[in-house]
């Protein structure tokens, strides 16, 4: 059974940092892109960023570019999201997602991901 389990969420003051982790089990995702999405209350789930299978390239939404960094450790089957300079508008449930295809097209499209974690809450106080 494939599982993605996020951790690392919590409460942080504006300007602070958090590091989220997403540990995969049940299969290896080392050959596939992985991504982070987030969903604020009453809003749609939005793309945050993605990373290629090797970790050699990343792509971010404009709202987080320069503040967030995605990395991965394929030996641990884990992807990370380092979030710096957090703002109140970053507050959301953050989800890890993985594809079962080694393609990069439509990387920001939610429906192209096959596996999802349960999410971890990030709360940013102003």
Image (spheres, rainbow, N blue to C red):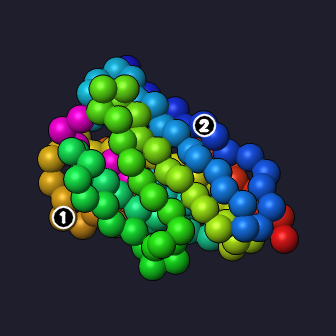
Magenta residues (range):
30-35
Whether residue 31 appears in magenta in the rendering, the answer is yes
Question: Where in the figure is residue 76, as x and y percent of width and height?
Answer: 37, 26
**Which residue, given by chain and number where applicable, does mark 2 sit on?**
7
Tell me: residue 36, above or below residue 60: above
Question: Where in the figure is residue 36, as x and y percent of width and height?
Answer: 45, 54
Picture disc at residue 105: 1
Quadrant where the N terminus sits is top left
Q: Is residue 3 left or right of residue 39?
A: left
Residue positioned 15% across, 47% down in the render: 102
Whether residue 15 appears in magenta in the rendering, the answer is no
Q: Main secondary structure of the magenta part?
A: loop
Question: What secondary structure is found at the residue carrying circle 1?
Answer: loop
Please identify the residue farthest to the right as the structure is shown.
Answer: 126
Note whether residue 33 is visible: no
Q: Is residue 88 left or right of residue 21?
A: right
Residue positioned 51% across, 63% down in the render: 68
The quadrant in which residue 86 appears is: bottom right
Residue positioned 42% across, 54% down in the render: 70
Question: Where in the figure is residue 103, as x and y percent of width and height?
Answer: 15, 54
Q: Nearer the viewer, mark 1 or mark 2?
A: 2
**Which sits in the foreground, 124 or 84?**
84
Distance Cα–Cα, label 1 vs label 2: 27 Å
Picture disc at residue 115: none
- Chain-order first, disc 1 or disc 2: 2
The quadrant in which residue 78 appears is: top left
Q: 10 Å neighbourhood of mark 2: few (<14), some, or many (≥20)?
A: some
Tell me: residue 39, above or below residue 114: below
Question: Where in the figure is residue 92, as x and y percent of width and height?
Answer: 66, 60
**Which sits in the foreground, 82 or 118?**
82
């Amino acid at each position: 059974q494939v599982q993605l389990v996020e951790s690392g969420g919590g409460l942080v003051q504006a300007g602070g940092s958090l590091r989220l982790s997403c540990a995969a089990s049940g299969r290896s995702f080392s050959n596939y892109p992985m991504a982070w999405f987030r969903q604020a209350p009453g809003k749609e789930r939005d793309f945050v960023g993605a990373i290629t299978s090797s970790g050699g390239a990343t792509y971010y939404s404009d709202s987080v570019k320069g503040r967030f960094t995605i990395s991965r450790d394929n030996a641990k089957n884990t992807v990370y999201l380092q979030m710096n300079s957090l703002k109140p508008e970053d507050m959301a449930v953050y989800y890890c997602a993985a594809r079962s295809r080694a393609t990069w097209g439509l990387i920001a499209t939610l429906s192209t991901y096959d596996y999802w974690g349960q999410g971890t809450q990030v709360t940013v106080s102003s």
